[in-house]
Amino acid sequence: MATIVLLHGWGRGAKSFLAVKELLENQGHKVHCFDLPGFGVVGPPPSPWAVDDYAGFVRDFIKRKGLRDFYLFGHSFGGRIGIKLAAQDPELLKGLILCDAAGITPRPQAKVSVFKLFSRIGNWIFSFPVLAAFRGVARRFVYWLSGEQDYYFLQNDVMRETFRRVIEEQLNEYLAKIKAPTLIIWGKLDRMTPIADAHTIHRSIPGSRLEILDGVGHSPHVEATEKLAALIDDFIK
């Protein structure tokens, strides 16, 4: 039996892991998953955070639980945190699993600026009572159309600034510092974190293993739950 800590993606929350958590527990593993600040049932941080702040939050959780020799799984934004922790605190981890991890290819600044402009215009348009009821639907549609769903979760100024700080940090320099055995899992159809990032991570982390899932997008834990759980279990064994 192994201990596994699951770190969710931006805006997703611990609930997104319920199915894969159950499968891993049925395989005999002890699984911890929790909401990061600003997501799920946990409120935003008191001031804007960067990746290092979230890594510190996870370190505190690990310390409180007294966890040792555990496997860290990070999906998307959670992968950013996983990369930082594995590079900065190699003694913490027995193994690292990066699933469609973010932090390698920077978001185009032009696209970020466009969505900031849309947000300001949209807030003004949908401030009219007759249109207010359509605000959520309109935002979801535009972000879905662009493949940039993460923008939908910028619900206040603290999280907007947190998002800016997070996406502006590239983590390529940390990859070669990772010494823990590493499994990289990627959806071949991922539109949010390109598959080229998977190959960059694989080349940069010595001895890492890469598994690409055909017909799967950015969320293997939702789209291919059983396959994901089987890969994690095989990697641990």
Image (cartoon, rainbow, N blue to C red):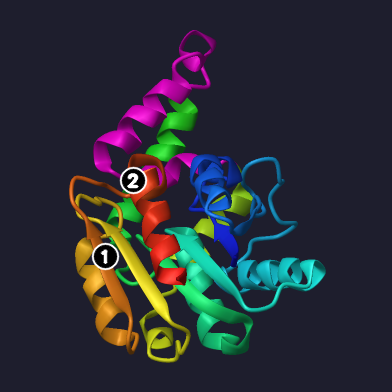
- Indicate which disc, 1 or 2, sits on the residue closer to the N terminus: 2
Q: Which residues are magenta?
A: 126-155
Residue in the picture at 42% in, 47% down: 150
Q: Secondary structure at mark 2?
A: loop
**Residue 98 position in % (x across, y down):** 41, 67
Residue 52, quarter of the rendered image: bottom right
Q: Secondary structure at mark 1?
A: strand
The residue lying toward the viewer, choosing from 29 and 15, is 29
Residue in the picture at 75% in, 70% down: 60
Q: Is residue 128 left or right of residue 54?
A: left
The residue lying toward the viewer, choosing from 39 and 33, is 33
**Magenta-drawn stretch contains 142:** yes
- Above or below, 164 relative to 197: above
Residue for badge 2: 148
**Residue 74 position in % (x across, y down):** 48, 63
Residue for badge 1: 211
Q: Looking at numbered disc 1 in the image, what kind of residue is underneath it?
A: Glu
The residue lying toward the viewer, choosing from 58 and 107, is 58
Residue in the picture at 27% in, 71% down: 210
- Badge 2 local density, few (<14 within 10 Å), some, or many (20+)? some
Residue 2, quarter of the rendered image: bottom right
The quarter in which the C terminus is drawn is: bottom left
Q: Main secondary structure of the magenta part?
A: helix
**Magenta-drawn stretch contains 148:** yes
Q: CA distance from mark 1 to mark 2?
A: 24 Å
